Amino acid sequence: MRPRHAAGLVALTAALTACSGGGSAAGAADLAADKPDISVNLRGEQAKAGSPVKVKLAEGKLKQVTVTGTEGAKLTGKVSANGTTWTSDRKAAPGTAYQVEAVTDEGGSARASFKTAAPDQVNKLTLTPGKDTTVGVAQPLSVVFDHPVKNKAEVEKHLKVTTSNGTEGSWGWIQNYDGKDRVDWRPKDYWKSGTKVKLDARLNGIDSGTDGGWFVRDYATGFTVGKSQKVKVDLDSKQATLVRDGQSVKTVPMSAGTPGGEKASWGGTSVLMAKEGTINMRSETVGLGDAYDKMVDNSMRLTWSGMYAHAAPWNAAYFGNTNHSSGCIGMSDGDASWLYGQVQVGDPFEVSGSGSKGVPDPGNGYGEWNLSWADWQTKSALS
């Protein structure tokens, strides 16, 4: 008589597909082949998510195991060297019904099902840049989470970046300007023009930790790196120069932030976050009281804290000779319109010279370029 499997494991059996004669040895062999004794580590209607699915065969060898989720997505996996155990590559997701089918090398088959408990809280994320976009050479991959991520190493392991030319880069965990957890993938140096980048965030079934909740889906994005260009802003000469493929295209006079206080411009490298066109700028939104309230044309956002490059015709007397703005890089209507038409989201603005108020934090826009490569790598949870 075949031994029973251990208590608490789910026995899966399939109906006989062949007749057997009166207790013969051949009949017993057919019975063993058609009714494999298989157990699954997850069972019932409230199974705990976050663990791989394991299917174990009591006797014989497994040939194939298929685990299919609610919406038809399959969990891939591998059979152990001795053929008795199959383990899924990924973890069971919360709130999901799974169907299990196992086939042995003798032709026997068995089925079972289980459902994981619904998540108490779901964590979601926002990916930048958007899918199928074209961006500048300084644009990082950026992931902002709705809820805290305590299990940073576990999450980072499931974020896969591939590039068309083997670009070296690293994830780094930072705090977004709004206080949310964020992780960015920055290349060691600026991207090469034409590079194609893809992110697969394989997070379905991953627990982000205390107060964070579960991820209940995968995410993906991909983009292409456009023209190799940057804007060099010199606070000393009060000039801004567009450089493309290493060659200066055009230099325009400008006036940056007034030195010596909160109205000073940020130095270092900021990345063009968005081309916002004509917008209303109000000083109280950046902590400067009621100094201004204007409709501003050709607005190019550089930080979350409110630093822009834009048209500033009211400041015309200072272009090229004095930094006298409230922190932004102001130009004439014509020069700002020209620059607005040339730049692309993801282009770096490299601000040099005296009179800045330091460099922006990594989470204030995309300020990670102000960290050395070695310092950026230490921000990976896997470093």
Image: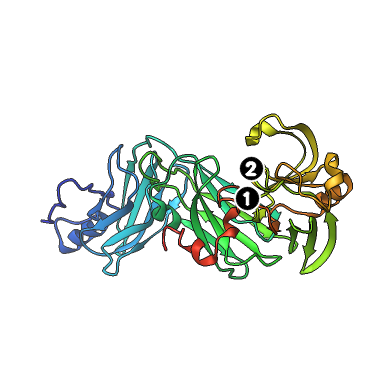
10 Å neighbourhood of mark 2: few (<14), some, or many (≥20)?
A: some
Q: Residue furthest left?
A: 1
Q: Earlier in the sequence, mark 1 or mark 2?
A: 2
Q: Could you tell me how far apart the alpha carbons at marks 1 and 2 are, in whole angstroms?
A: 7 Å
| Residue 293 horizontal side relative to residue 8, left or right | right
Asked whether the viewer can see residue 332, the reply is no
| Residue 39 horizontal side relative to residue 214, left or right | left
Residue 364 position, x and y percent, is 59, 47
Secondary structure beneath dot 1 equals loop
Amino acid of disc 2: Glu
Q: Residue furthest front?
A: 260
| Residue 227 horizontal side relative to residue 38, left or right | right
Residue 269 position, x and y percent, is 65, 57
> Residue at left 64%, top 49%?
130
Residue 311 position, x and y percent, is 82, 43
Q: In which quadrant is the N terminus drawn?
A: bottom left
Asked whether the viewer can see residue 217, the reply is yes
Q: Where is residue 371, by image quadrant?
A: bottom right
Q: Closest to the observer: 111 or 347?
A: 347
Q: Which mark is residue 357?
A: 1
Q: Which mark is residue 56?
A: none
Amino acid of disc 1: Lys
The answer to whether the residues at label 1 and label 2 have Cβ atoms under 8 Å apart is yes
Secondary structure beneath dot 2 equals loop
Residue 356 position, x and y percent, is 66, 52
Disc 2: which residue: 262
